[in-house]
Image (spheres, rainbow, N blue to C red):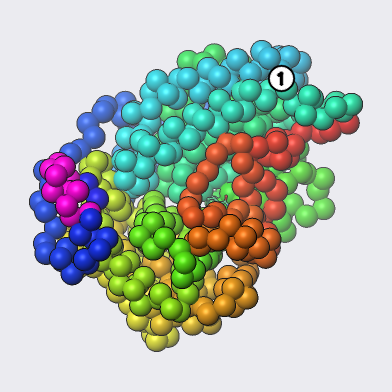
Amino acid sequence: MHTRRAPLRAKKKSAAAHVPELIFGDLWEFDPAPETADPRLRDQYDLFIGGTFVPPRSGRYFETVNPATEKVIASVALAGPDDVDAAFAAAQKAFEGPWRKMPGKERGKYIYRIARLIQERAREFAVVETMDGGKPIKESRDFDVPMAAAHFFYHAGWADKIEYALPGCRVEPLGPVGQVIPWNFPLLMLAWKIAPALAMGNTIVLKPAETTPLTALKLGELLREAELPHGVVNFVTGAGDTGAAVMGHPAAKKIAFTGSTEVGKIIMRQTAGTDKKMTMELGGKAANIVFDDAPIDQAVEGVVNGIFFNQGHVCCAGSRLLVQESIAELFVEKLKRRIDVLRVGNPLDKNTDVGAINSRMQLEKIEELVESGVAQGATIYQPSCRLPGRGFFYRPTIFTAVTQSHRIACEEIFGPVLSVLTFRTLEEAVEKANNTAFGLSAGVWTDKGSRILKMSTLLKAGVVWANTFNKFDPSSPFGGYKESGFGREGGRHGLLDYAKVV
Ligand code: NAP
Ligand code: MG
């Protein structure tokens, strides 16, 4: 919760924790607190190829809108197959030129420089990320942008050290790599992709998502400032066809994709039979499991953070709450009280907790899945907060009386919607948590260390958080099991996906 009146906030917080019924009055009025930093945007962006911005050979442009206002922010070049060819030609030339031969310690200096420039321009990047994608400014300011910088810092350190981690081996770059990313963490996903690829000496062609291309294009400007050799990083903007051209390009020695399982499968079919190295970071339907000995109020905060962070547009979102039956009623009551005071609205306002849904298409997908939940018999709860008249917004939503066969318990909603299920024993919790096609993440809330260790071995998930959720660090590998994909990003594991070890 946020308020300008600190003493009242303290009082209200403790009331929320212990006497829920006292807090159900109207929300206090807040003065608007909009972030005002200049985003330094242009009206039109070309493709970033060979270290410079070039008009698309396709001659076509598309518009990117602000999902909170539905207003056009800028027009952006649409890369066709010829443009993707040009980007890979630039990447190949840069690879064979100075980049491949550059000692790791020199390469590392460029990566450090990128990290420092992101920090210097952090406010500007945060505003653009929020305008283009709809996420609350407090998240882009305090999470997306600092984490993106952290990824460059971390990987800069590896550029001249990887061989010390693999005694007796030689580590070589792969060549040009093709990368495609989604719209939920545009700059951060870009950092996850580019930083390890650069550290290992590869060159890059990356396609950002159609609805959120702007931070990548601004990063292109920043790479010029960092004087990165031309062609080492290239950005081709566009939609799915551009993505397919990047993934299928014969010059791409490795492809890295983050996005939906559905598109991941299309790419696997498209590239079957080639010798491309490949990593897939796909969807999720994580279980956040609360045992009856958990610190309840902390767990409520963790569950709220797990599903309402970034409007639930999070691959590892804790979208299924599994709560032990003996505390389920109390827990759900506290959860409802908590979401009653989430502030939904202008993403640029520093007090906003839940911003705009990324696009009309995504909003319609959320609406359709929520309707299916109601139709299949689950019980819906939504706070009565007012939503802005324009833009794509959705109320935080909790479903109880959910069964494992409901669509809202199986399918990735990728929105601010939590499905609550209950369990009696640890075995039942594990069985329900693992009863999904996905396996990206899970959360366990309990006082017992031994139970945490046991659960972390039994849960089929790439990451298991204990008494916390949505915690990330560049040194910690992230990735999935089953239909959540394969390969890891972050840490030493992530680096080795961008290298040949001989
Ligand atoms: P998406 O529809 O799969 O799109 C992801 C990217 O692929 C976008 O840039 C998209 O372009 C592009 N694309 C679409 N069709 C393509 C094709 N046939 N070939 C190549 N590229 C193609 O996913 P999304 O809706 O953007 O993102 C949400 C999904 O990403 C969720 O499922 C989420 O769980 C997953 N995700 C996973 C992770 C992870 O680390 N595991 C992290 C974040 C998100 P356009 O959007 O421009 O059309
Ligand atoms: Mg946009």
| Quarter of the figure with the C terminus | top right
Residue pictured at 57% horizontal, 77% vertical: 425
Residue pictured at 25% horizontal, 63% vertical: 18
- Where residue 185 appears, as percent x and y from the top left, is 46, 44
Q: Is residue 113 left or right of residue 462?
A: left
Which residue range is magenta in the image? 3-13
Q: Amino acid at mark 1?
A: Asp
Q: Residue 420's image quarter?
A: bottom left
Q: Magenta residues: mostly which secondary structure? A: helix
- Where residue 21 appears, as percent x and y from the top left, is 18, 69
Residue pictured at 19% horizontal, 48% vertical: 10
**Residue to which mark 1 is pinned:** 160
- Where residue 45 appears, as percent x and y from the top left, is 41, 31
Indicate whether residue 337 is drawn in magenta.
Answer: no
Crowdedness of circle 1 by 10 Å Cα count: few (<14), some, many (20+)?
some
Closer to us: 350 or 2: 2
Closer to us: 294 or 388: 294
Closer to us: 44 or 247: 247
Q: Is residue 111 visible?
A: yes
| Vertical arrangement, residue 16 with respect to residue 206, above or below | below
